[in-house]
Image (cartoon, rainbow, N blue to C red):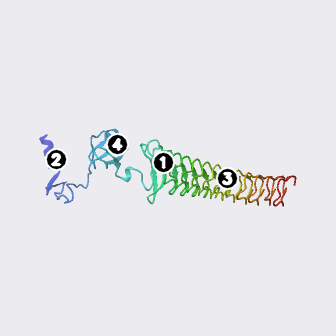
Amino acid sequence: MKKLLLLIVTATCITSHAQNVGINNDASLPDNSAMLDIKSSTKGLLIPRMNSAAVAAIASPAKGLLVLDTTKNQLLVNIGTPAIPNWQTIMASSGWSLTGNAGIDPNTQFIGTLDTKPFIIRVNNVRSGYIDTITMNSSYGFRSLDSVTTGEGNTAMGYKSLSANKTSDYNTGIGWSSLRNNSTGNYNTGVGFNSLRNNSTGSQNTGVGAWALYLNTTGINNAAFGAGALQSNTTGSSNTASGILGLGTNSTGIHNTAVGQAAILNNTTGNRNTAVGSDALRNIISASDNVAIGFKTLFNTNGYSNVAVGTHALYLNSNRSNLVAVGD
């Protein structure tokens, strides 16, 4: 033991100065800002090495304790407390690099969490991605689903989709501002630019296409497929539109069905109308209980309880009711 101590003293110059210590081979004084100043041009400092299990087993590790985790191949420092340790990497090269990574093992290396805490992505310090296994909420896009509190099972993708949603459940918004203002509506699906953007309390609505059900606020059980379909609907319920601008100006009408481009386009308050064909019942405004099947059938009507089947059937009818026409 005496020989070993003599060897260390011979090989290394240790100087003490004003209660700080320097270890070097040139007899220089330690830096005043350091309690321990180690200097060498040929060797480094080797800190304790241990696997992940051993790191986790350290009893009451001091805040700032430094170790090398040989399992993760990372330098770790405890930034927590002795009672609640929080081991974090301190070097970019021992974690994910901002310039890309090579040789990644997808079975053991990933970006994410090791517990049930949500995984969050931020842009400009604003939430832009969110995955939570407890509430089953998922989002991707700037401010998408960023107000959620107790709502569960929501999925948002796109700029500010479902951004006002707080307590509502099982909504899906995909597209720029889809379901953006939804607050308490449940089971809604908006797919496309501004689809169901202004929905607030309406539930069980489906809008697929740009502007589909754009103005809907409290209407329920509506289905719109196509750009601008049911775009002006506000409180109307149980309407179905399939085709560009189908039921495009409907606002409060209920139980209307439009299949075809611009079918029942100008209806606002009429109820229980059915149109199958492009421009069928196009100019109806407030009349109800009409059935039109064919291209531009009942094109100009504002009458009630008419039935027309065939291209242009009852095309010029304006306000007469209870008519039946079959044929071109």
Q: Element at badge 3?
A: strand
Near mark 1 (Cα within 10 A), the count class, few <14, some 14-19 or many ≥20, is few
Q: Nearer the viewer, mark 4 or mark 2?
A: 4
Q: Between residue 60 and residue 37, name the one nearer to us.
A: 60
Q: Which residue is mark 3?
A: 224
Q: Element at badge 2?
A: helix
Question: Disc 3 to disc 2, how far (Cα)?
Answer: 83 Å
Q: Nearer the viewer, mark 3 or mark 1?
A: 1
Q: Element at badge 1?
A: loop
Q: Which residue is mark 4?
A: 70
Near mark 3 (Cα within 10 A), the count class, few <14, some 14-19 or many ≥20, is many
Q: Nearer the viewer, mark 1 or mark 2?
A: 1
Q: Between residue 64 and residue 260, name the one nearer to us.
A: 260
Q: Which residue is mark 2?
A: 8
| Residue 102 seen | no
Q: Earlier in the sequence, mark 3 or mark 1?
A: 1
Question: Disc 4 to disc 3, how far (Cα)?
Answer: 57 Å
Amino acid carrying label 2: it is Ile
In contact (CB < 8 Å): disc 3 and disc 2: no
Identify the mark at residue 150; answer none if there is no mark.
Answer: 1
Question: Disc 1 to disc 2, how far (Cα)?
Answer: 64 Å
Query: Can you tell which quarter of the image residue 40 is in?
Result: bottom left
Tell whether 273 sits left or right of 312: left
Q: Earlier in the sequence, mark 4 or mark 2?
A: 2
Q: Nearer the viewer, mark 3 or mark 2?
A: 3
